[in-house]
Image (spheres, helix red, strand yellow):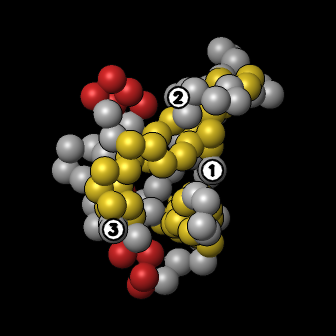
């Protein structure tokens, strides 16, 4: 999964850009364009963010908080964060957009602008 600077030169939100708002408000991160959900994959070293089939368990792993953070359900000290590592340029659009990886990092005030998410 990745994040990129907002752009709408296509005239609206593209199929790979938006979650279903109603489901998102219930902490289900459903992307209608792919009929898939954002969820987590754990191993002993890290927590990865992946797209996978949706099921009732999806809303139990990630929490979209009222303050705009996305937390792991079992550890609200970790926030989904737009990483400063591996920034790269997109392949089109005007203006050319930036692409960054997303990952879980400790929730911190000094990087909170990279850890806040919204609905539009």
Q: Which mark is residue 113?
A: none
Identify the image quadrant of residue 52. bottom right
Which residue is denoted by mark 1 in the rendering? 1
Please indicate, yes or no, whether residue 74 appears anywhere in the rendered image: yes
Which residue is denoted by mark 2 in the rendering? 6
Residue at image location 60% in from the left, 77% down from the top:
53
Identify the image quadrant of residue 99. top right
Q: Estimate the x, y position of residue 80 in percent, counting from the top left.
A: 44, 47
Of the image marks 1 and 2, the number of the one nearer the N terminus? 1
**Viewer-proximal residue among 71 and 23:** 71
Q: Nearer the viewer, mark 1 or mark 2?
A: 1
Which residue is denoted by mark 3 in the rendering? 74
The answer to whether the residue labelled 2 contacts the one labelled 3, judged by CB atoms less than 8 Å apart, is no
Q: Nearer the viewer, mark 1 or mark 3?
A: 3
Q: Relative to 81, does residue 6 appear above or below in the rendering?
A: above
Mark 1 to mark 2 CA distance (whole Å): 15 Å
**Viewer-proximal residue among 67 and 24:** 67
């Amino acid at each position: 999964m990745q994040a990129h600077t907002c752009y709408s030169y296509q005239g609206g939100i593209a199929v790979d850009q938006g979650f279903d708002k109603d489901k998102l408000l219930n902490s289900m991160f459903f992307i209608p364009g792919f009929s898939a959900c954002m969820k987590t994959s754990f191993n002993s070293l890290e927590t990865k963010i992946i797209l996978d089939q949706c099921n009732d368990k999806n809303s139990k792993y990630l929490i979209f908080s009222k303050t705009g953070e996305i937390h792991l359900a079992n550890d609200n000290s970790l926030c989904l964060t737009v990483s400063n590592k591996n920034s790269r340029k997109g392949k089109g659009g005007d203006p050319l957009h930036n692409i960054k990886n997303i990952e879980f990092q400790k929730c911190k005030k000094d990087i909170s602008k990279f850890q806040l998410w919204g609905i539009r």
